[in-house]
Image (cartoon, helix red, strand yellow):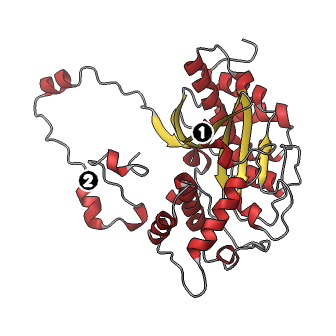
Amino acid sequence: MALKQPALLPGVAVYNRNSLREEDLQALKFTAPPRTASANEFYTMYAEFNAQRCYTRQSYTALTTHGAEDFDISDYFVKNEAQQIATPNYRYSILSDGQLRGASFGVLFHSLCEAYPFSPTQLQQLLQQENLSADDEHDYPAQFSAMLEETFSYPLIDDLCLRDLRERSLHELEFNLLIKDSHSLREQIADLLARYYGDTHPFTRSCRMLDKVEAGFLVGFIDLFFEYQGKYWILDYKTNTLTDYTHAKNHLAIESQLVESMADHHYYLQYLLYLVAVKRYLEQRLGLADATELLGGAVYFYVRGIFTEQLSSGDGIYLDTGCQNLVRELDLLFRGVSNAE
């Protein structure tokens, strides 16, 4: 909350761990009160002391990057490309020259999508905050303005585009998912994926590579939560650089670069967790015992894909419209209930 809306939490200081100084660390250091010399006082004060392990609070990114040496706070929004890869030709020079790539482009574009629509003056102010302004080589305001217009008019489902969703969507829907018992949870999730996708599917194999799943609260922010034709959907923006952005209508397109990216970054698990949260949200708000039938599915929008020179209909879109029963079983798994029950 302090990262996203600092004005709401004036007493909270936010630090970038990569730029912390020694003085900052000393100022943050906790100084414990002096210990009491009386054993009787100690037992009186801590009579209710419980040595059981406390719950942790983790983000989806932390869940999928345990032990990764390249983990960075910017991964909250996008995953940095670990190496240079061959890329398609883009119609915008700010993407082609490589100056804006990985997290630098992803975080900026995500912020612009959140703020859209805006006036030319507002756009310039947002870009100036990132030290980007028109120069002899790049007209950043003009290029970003054109890119955002394309993004918000690009068909996602049927002819539905982001511009159509303004009145029936929530941005950055926050949720907390309780994981009561992490024992063997990763294996249970992988086994569940194997039943739906197959043991050799990229999603299943990727899930089995997860390090661990901690007990506690899993916190997440859904980029876009919206209703369409009586069903409820989630949408997530991705700015990953791929060699090919050919659309993938579902998980069966296993030769697709989009499916490979969904597996490599555990995005399949991200949207399944998001939909579990949406299912519970609908059940609570609408007073339903089971909201599975109200789930539409997930749209993962690889925005770079729509800026390529060789653009085909649907490129950049990964769409899953058939995951409802999987989400239902995953919800039961998190509740500690078997499907048989």
Viewer-nearest residue: 190 or 203: 203
- In screen coordinates, is 89 left or right of 216? right
* Residue that mark 1 sits on: 167
Q: Residue at x 73, y 44 (%)?
A: 299
Q: Position of residue 62 (x, y in %)?
A: 55, 48
Mark 2 or mark 1, earlier in chain? 2
Left or right for 334, reference 258: left
Q: Which residue is mark 2?
A: 29
Q: Is residue 203 above or below residue 118?
A: above
From this viewpoint, is residue 209 visible? Answer: no
| Count of number-bearing discs | 2
Q: Amino acid at mark 1?
A: Glu
**Where, by quadrant of the figure, is residue 242 drawn?**
bottom right
Mark 2 vs mark 1: give the one in front.
1
CA gap, disc 2 to disc 1?
A: 46 Å
Q: Work out whether residue 114 or residue 64 is closer to the camera in this orientation and state it.
A: 114
> SS at mark 1?
helix
In the displayed structure, 144 sits above or below 288; it is below
> Percent x, y for residue 54?
42, 31
